Amino acid sequence: MVTLLAYGYCVGVPSSRKIERKTHEDVGFRVIAGGNHPDHTALSEFRRIHLAALAGLFLLRGLTKVRGEWSLMTLCHNLLKLHACSA
């Protein structure tokens, strides 16, 4: 779910309903979802429950945390490249 939400934000699709739709239409979203199609309610509830942790992904500090943030940034970069190839 985290990767699916992060990918959605990276490609400009932050809406849970649109992410759900994209898991049916877009190859990048399909690959990340592993062929599953999570309901928009499940995506929204996951985001609500884990909002603090998800917000913290982009506000990390310290060497270890910066490495984690860098890994997240490279993941988003690679997901964007995957999205560009599927378009």
Image (spheres, helix red, strand yellow):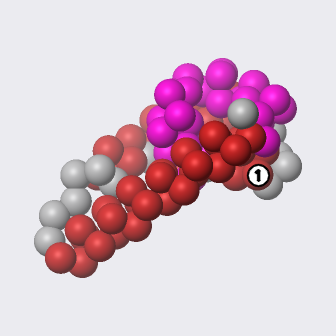
- Which of the two residues, 85 or 51, is positioned nearer the viewer here? 85
The dominant secondary structure in magenta is helix
Q: Residue furthest bottom?
A: 64
Residue 60 image point, x, y percent: 22, 59
Residue at image position (29%, 73%) is 67
Location of the C terminus by quadrant is: top right
- Residue 4 in the magenta stretch? The answer is yes
For label 1, the SS is: helix
- Residue 77 in the magenta stretch? The answer is no
Residue at image position (50%, 45%) is 6
Task: From the image, tell me which residue sits under label 1.
Answer: 31
Mark 1 burial class by Cα count in 10 Å: few <14, some 14-19, many 20+: few
Residue at image position (40%, 67%) is 71
Q: Going by the image, does 81 lie left or right of 73?
A: right
Residue 58 image point, x, y percent: 29, 50
**Residue 73, visible in the rendered structure:** yes
Q: How many numbered dots are placed on residues in this image?
A: 1
Q: Going by the image, does 37 lie left or right of 20?
A: right
Q: Going by the image, does 35 lie left or right of 38?
A: right
**Residue 38, visible in the rendered structure:** no
Residue at image position (48%, 39%) is 10
Per the rendered image, the range of residues in magenta is 3-27
Residue 51 image point, x, y percent: 38, 41
Residue 25 sits in which quadrant? top right
Q: Image height check: is 59 above or below 9? A: below
Q: Amino acid at mark 1?
A: Val
Q: Image height check: is 62 above or below 5? A: below
- Which of the two residues, 51 or 57, is positioned nearer the viewer here? 57
Residue 43 image point, x, y percent: 61, 36
